[in-house]
Amino acid sequence: MASPAAEQRDSSPLDLERFAATPLRREPFDFVIVPEFLRPEALPAIEQDFPEITKGGSFPAQSLTCGPRFTALLAELQGPAVTAAFAGKFGIDLSGRPTMVTLRGQSRAKDGQIHTDSKTKLVTALIYLNSAWESDGGRLRMLNRPDDLEDYAAEVPPRAGTLVCFRCSENAYHGHKPFVGQRRSIQLNWLTDESVLKRELGRHAFSAWTKRVLRFGT
C-alpha cells in the first residue's frame, strides 16, 4: 500500500523529482530548464482551466477567473514543498518570503526585449502552457551579455509543461525574438518582502485601471 506522501506525489501535476534531478547551470548565471515539469497527463485539464486572456501584458492571477484545476495548481506552486525545492536548488533561504503569480496569454511585438528582473525578486520561475511551438520567435533565451540576443547559453521553446527558472541577479539577462499571438505562461516569483508584493499588486491594478480609462474614457 502506497504511503500518503507517495500518493500525494503521484497525484500532483508537478514533477518535483524531475526538477531535483535536473542540474543547476551556473553560466552565465544560475538557471534550470525542466521539460515536462508539469506532468503530461495533467496538462489537458490545466490548459482547459487557464483563464481567457485576450490582451498583452501580465496579470495577477487573483484578478482573473481561473478554473478549479488551474487554481489548485497555483496553490501548489506557492506551497511549502515547491518553495523548499527551489530554495535547495538555488541555495537560497526562501522561507517566509512572499510569492507572486502573474499570467500572460498574449505576446506583443514589443515583448521579449533584453532585461533583468528587478532586485526585489529573488527567484523567477516561468511555466509555459502552449501545446506546440513552431515559431522562431517567443523562445526565451538565457543570454551571455546584455546587448546581443544572438549570444545565448540556452533557448527555451515555450511548450506546455516546460519550466525555466533562474536566480535573479544583475547579470541574469534574458529575452526572446518578437512573436505576436497566443503565448501562455505562468510566472512565479519569490519576493524580498511583503511591501514589494503590495506595491507590485497595486502597480498592476493601476495599470489595468489606466487601460480601461484610455479605452472607454472617463
Image (tube, grey):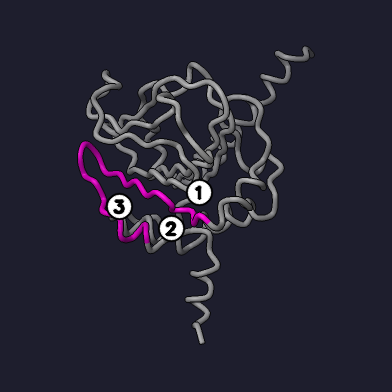
Give the residue pinned by disc 2. Answer: 83
Query: What amino acid is at disc 3?
Result: Phe
Which of pointers 1 and 2 lies earlier in the amino acid sequence? Answer: 2
- Report x, y in % for residue 85: 38, 60
Alpha carbon separation for disc pair 1 and 2? 9 Å
Report how far apart the C-alphas of labels 3 and 1 lie in the structure.
16 Å
The residue most toward the left is 27
- The residue depicted at 36 percent of the width and 25 percent of the height is 115
Mark closer to the chain start, 3 or 1: 3
Q: What element carries label 1?
A: strand
State which mark lies toward you, 3 or 1: 3
In contact (CB < 8 Å): disc 1 and disc 2: yes
Numbered mark located on residue 90 in the image: 3
* Magenta-tinted stretch: 18-40
Q: Distance between the Cα atoms at labels 2 and 3?
A: 11 Å
At x 30%, y 22%, the residue is 149
Q: What residue type is labelled 2?
A: Thr
State which tag comes first along the sequence, 2 or 3. Answer: 2
Mark 1, residue position: 99
Q: Residue at x 36, y 57 (%)?
A: 19
